[in-house]
Image (spheres, rainbow, N blue to C red):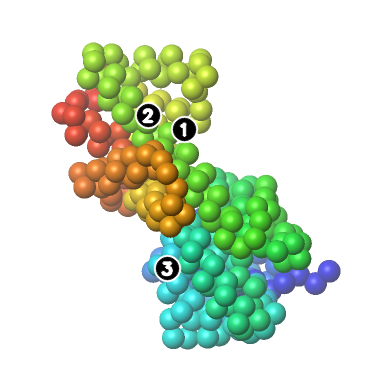
Amino acid sequence: MTKHRIGFVGVGLMGHGMAKNLVEKGWTVAVLGHRNRAPVIDLVGRGATDAGNVTALVQSSDIVFLCVTGTPEVEDLVHRPGGILDACREGQIVIDTSTSQPASTLRMKDAFAAKGVRFVDSPLTRTPVEAEQGRLNTLVGADDATFAEIEPVLRGFCENVFHIGAVGSAHALKLVNNFIAIGTAALCAEAVVACKKLGVEPKKLHELGSVGAMNSGIFQLVVGGAAEGDYTKMKFALKNAAKDVRYLVQTTTDAQLAGVMIAAVNQSLNQAIGLGFGAPDKMLPSVVEAQAQLNGVDLTPAR
C-alpha cells in the first residue's frame, strides 16, 4: 500500500517525536517549525524535508498534521493569507492534534469541506517522553471512512487510537479528560496546603494516600512531589492547563451545563497565574505553591 505523504506543522516537545516516528517508519514527511530550529534540523537529518513555508508544505502533502498550542494558533495557520485553507486541494486531510475548542473545530470542518478537504480532530494524551517512543494516545473525531484511512498513520506514533465519533467529539472529550487531571491536581494542592496549615506534614498525606483508594498517578506527581519540595514532576505547563480549562468553561457554557467544579478549577488556576505562576517553566504542580502563597504557608519539607 502506498503511504500518504505527510506534512507536519509544529515540531516542538510533542511534534518532534511524532514526526520522528513517522519518518523512521517509512513515511515521506515535510516539516515546518517555529522559532526553535533545532528540532527541524534534527528531523531533516533523519530524512524529513524542511518545507520552509505553509504553502509549500500543504502542496507537497496528502495529510497535514497540526501540533500547536491551541485554537488561536490553529485558526491562524488555517485562515491567514497563504495559509492552509488557501493552499489546500480537494482530497486532502488536515488533522489537528492540538487541544482546541470544539466550536472552532466544527467551523473549520465546514470551511475545509467547501474545498473538498476533510478536517479531523485528533488530540493527544501522554507526554513528550511517549511521543519520542511512539507511544502516545490519541482521540479521533472523524467519519468511519476517514478514520479507517488515517488510523495506520496515527499508529505510526501512537500506542492507543480511540475513535470517539464525529468531528468535534475528540476535542470535547480531550477537554473533559484534561479537566479530570487538572481538577485532581487542584484538589491535591488544596489538600497539601490544608495539611501544612493544620500542622501535618504533607509527606504523611502522601504516605496515607499511597496505600488507599485515592492513589493515582496525579496524586503521586503532585502530592508526592510537594512532599519532596519538587513541583516539576508533572510535565504539563500550568498556563496550558489553564488554557484547557478555559476552553472547557466556554464549551460547557455554550451547552448550558449546570455545575460548579469546572468554574472552581478555572478560578484556582487563574489565581495561580495571577500570583505569578504562569511562566513557561512553571508546571501544573505549582498550583500547590500558589495555594501556599495565598494562605501564607511555608511548604519547606521538614527535616
Q: Picture coordinates of residue 259 (x, y %)?
A: 41, 41
Amino acid under disc 2: Cys
Of 299 and 260, which appears nearest the observer?
260
In-image side of 98 versus 198 (left or right): right
Query: Disc 1, disc 2: CB below 8 Å?
Result: yes
Report which quarter residue 63 is drawn in: bottom right
How many C-alpha atoms fall within 10 Å of the one at disc 1: few (<14), some, or many (≥20)? Answer: some
Q: Residue at x 43, y 60 (%)?
A: 69
Q: Please, what is the three-letter code of the amino acid marked with disc 1?
A: Ile
Residue placed most toward the observer, 161 or 33: 161
- Residue at 64%, 73% (x, y): give it: 118
- Quadrant position of the N terminus in the picture: bottom right
Q: CA distance from mark 1 to mark 3?
A: 28 Å
Name the residue rendered at 43%, 57% in the picture: 254
Of the two numbered discs 3 and 2 on the same chain, state the one appearing first in sequence.
Answer: 3
For the residue marked with disc 3, what is the amino acid? Glu
Kindly identify which residue carries mark 2. 188
Tell me the crowding category of disc 3: few under 14, some 14 to 19, or many 20 or more residues within 10 angstroms, Cα based: some
Q: Secondary structure at mark 2?
A: helix
In this view, the residue in front, 90 or 152, is 90
Residue with the mark numbered 1: 218
Q: Which residue is mark 3?
A: 73
Sequence-wise, the earlier of marks 1 and 2 is 2
When the figure is inspected, residue 86 is found, relative to residue 201, above or below; the finding is below
State which quarter of the image contains the C terminus: top left
Label 2: few (<14), some (14–19) or many (≥20) C-alpha neighbours in 10 Å: many
Secondary element type, mark 1: helix
